Image: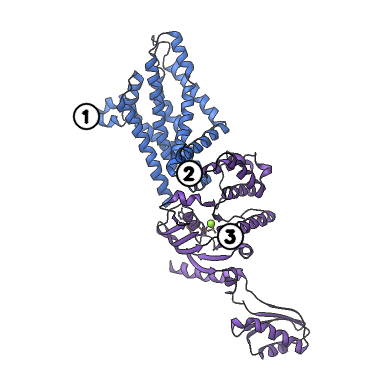
Chain colours: A blue, B purple
Amino acid sequence: MNESLRNIWTILKRELTGYFASPVAYVFIVIFLLLNGFFTFMLGGFFEQGEASLSRPFFNWHPWLYLFLVPAAGMRLWAEERRVGTLELLLTMPITAWQAIVGKFLACWTFLALALALTFPVVISVFYLGHPDGLAIISGYIGSFLLAGAYLSVTLATSAITRNQVISFILSVVICFFLILAGWEPVTNLLVRWAHPDIVELVAGFSVMPHFANFQRGVVDFRDLLFFASVIVFSLFSTSVILRNLRGA
Amino acid sequence: MIHVENLIKEFGPKRAVNGVSFTVKRGEILGFLGPNGAGKSTTMRMITGFIPPTSGAVRIAGFDISEKPIEAKKLIGYLPESAPCYSDMTVNGFLRFTAELRGLRGAAIDSAVANVAGLCFLEGVLHQSVDTLSKGYRHRTCFAQSILHDPQVLVLDEPTDGLDPNQKHEVRQIIKRMGQTKAIIFSTHILEEVEACCTHAIIIDHGTVVANGTPSELKSRADNAGSVSLRVHSIAAETVRTRLNSLSLSGKVTLQGSDVTVTARIFPRDRTLSGELARAVADLAIKEGWRFDELYTEEGRLDDVFRTITLPNSVKSTSKD
Ligand SMILES: Nc1ncnc2c1ncn2[C@@H]1O[C@H](COP(=O)(O)OP(=O)(O)OP(=O)(O)O)[C@@H](O)[C@H]1O
Ligand SMILES: [Mg+2]
């Protein structure tokens, strides 16, 4: 294993064990699963929809669910290091800031993936009840995973801005909310009344919604993958710029 | 090993560090002194690559900290001022984590952790969560982290802060021992510590170096350094004064005390002759048949030097601002 991978792995391992050393992780997972169940079965009309599909009752809620849960999971990543002062320790180790950023990001993403994977009973029930499109479910999960990653990368950047977790949480929710609204149908339907449809479409292009919708429908498009990858890379890059500048000032 | 060249750090309009330069070679221990807010921690943060300097350069064994940060950081062990530790880990977990980041693997980690746990008396708390440690133990844990990989360069920001007297002594012993083969720089507010361990000392005030030398060189800058002190009994003070004044080597003579016990302080006319002055005073006292029970040459106290160097400066620059 080369040195930078090893450093990323070391940091990932520490962050991940850090999650499970405290009850926060378990509380988080339980809340995530409860909310998922509530939305899917109570609000999503899983049983009433009359077809075996997860697209609407299950995945539809994920952008909204993640809006609060992902910032909650990631808000401490840098804010806590800054507050306690361990940032000074971490960044004077023989590692690059990038390795630390990627390690932290992957750790939290793994944690979110685990929470997502624990929703498997929903998949079992839908197969039990009917004959769903298995590929659509897989692509829905991929989309949901990428969506969580995109939000998380934003949270990582806001977490680096401040030593206060609450501020980091709120900033992150606001930005992610914008990422939803810009392309959320009720909003775009309103916008086309005032703006040229091309402009509305351009703005919507920055939103996670149309890209996530494709995954939900079972379409894995290269452009959607590219979108999520760019959001993540851009946010991680911003994180590194923020970290560098905060130390300089 | 450590080369610091004209280091400057500005925080907004404020200059925290203003042109600091010095060198620490292998086998040297540099004590870094200065009043609160002088810029000690800021300088150390730049040396260890935590914050980039506004201008100036730091080289660790030839590696520029801004251009070759990884190579330079590999050689450094660093104890930050607040001795931060990851509170959600055990002491053992924390030390192993830092060992891994330092590039140690497998059995090397085990032996390094066991070694520093012994040196810093952490065996009893190895499996305790950092959260629940007392302040001194947390400090020791972070200190252990800094020496774990046996670095060639040690940067310690107030390493004995918050330790009990026994531990202070232990840490000084460790620093002294390691100083024989490494380049060490440590900051402190305890001046005896500098005399006890350091080969060199720097006093920094308002971001500039105001004194630089060996501890004894610094001490000799005290106003009373080189003066001879004599305590005599049952002699009239005026007699003592006139006799002492008549010595060819003596300059000013000050007296303290009553006629029963008088302590005289004789300043040499020329500082380089203070040794001879002491002998002349002793001869005089014996010749006169004075009953004296104390005679010594004042070396100067670091406290006094520190105060005289840093106090007027702070008055000057506050009036400037
Ligand atoms: N991040 C920062 N932003 C603004 N000013 C800062 C920052 N860090 C330090 N300073 C200022 O720089 C000056 C030097 O601080 P520094 O911590 O280096 O002092 P010090 O010599 O270590 O003091 P002490 O003995 O109290 O530890 C102080 O006036 C401090 O307020
Ligand atoms: Mg300090």
Q: Position of residue A122 (x, y in %)?
A: 46, 16
Q: CA distance from mark 2 to mark 3?
A: 28 Å
Q: Are marks 3 and 1 on the same chain?
A: no
Which residue is identified by label 3? B188
| Element marked by disc 1 | helix
Quarter of the view holding residue A198: top left
Q: CA distance from mark 2 to mark 1?
A: 40 Å
Task: Tell me the subunit letter for badge 3.
Answer: B
Q: Quadrant of the C terminus of chain B?
A: bottom left
Is residue B106 in view? yes
Instruction: Pick whichever, A209 or A174, lies toward us.
Output: A209
Is A211 rendered above or below residue B66? above
Q: Are marks 2 and 3 on the same chain?
A: no
Give the residue type that dot 3 points to: Thr
Which residue is identified by label 1? A198
Quarter of the view holding residue B237: bottom right
Q: CA distance from mark 3 to mark 1?
A: 65 Å
Q: Position of residue B280 (x, y in %)?
A: 69, 86
Is residue A55 in view? no
Q: Are marks 2 and 1 on the same chain?
A: yes
Question: Between disc 2 and disc 1, whose residue precedes?
Answer: 2
Give the residue type that dot 2 points to: Arg
Give the residue type that dot 1 points to: Asp
Please say if the residues under marks 2 and 1 sit with CB atoms less than 8 Å apart. Answer: no
Instruction: Pick whichever, A80 or A117, lies toward us.
Output: A117
Which residue is identified by label 2? A163
Neighbour tally class for label 2: few under 14, some 14-19, many 20 plus, Cα within 10 Å:
some
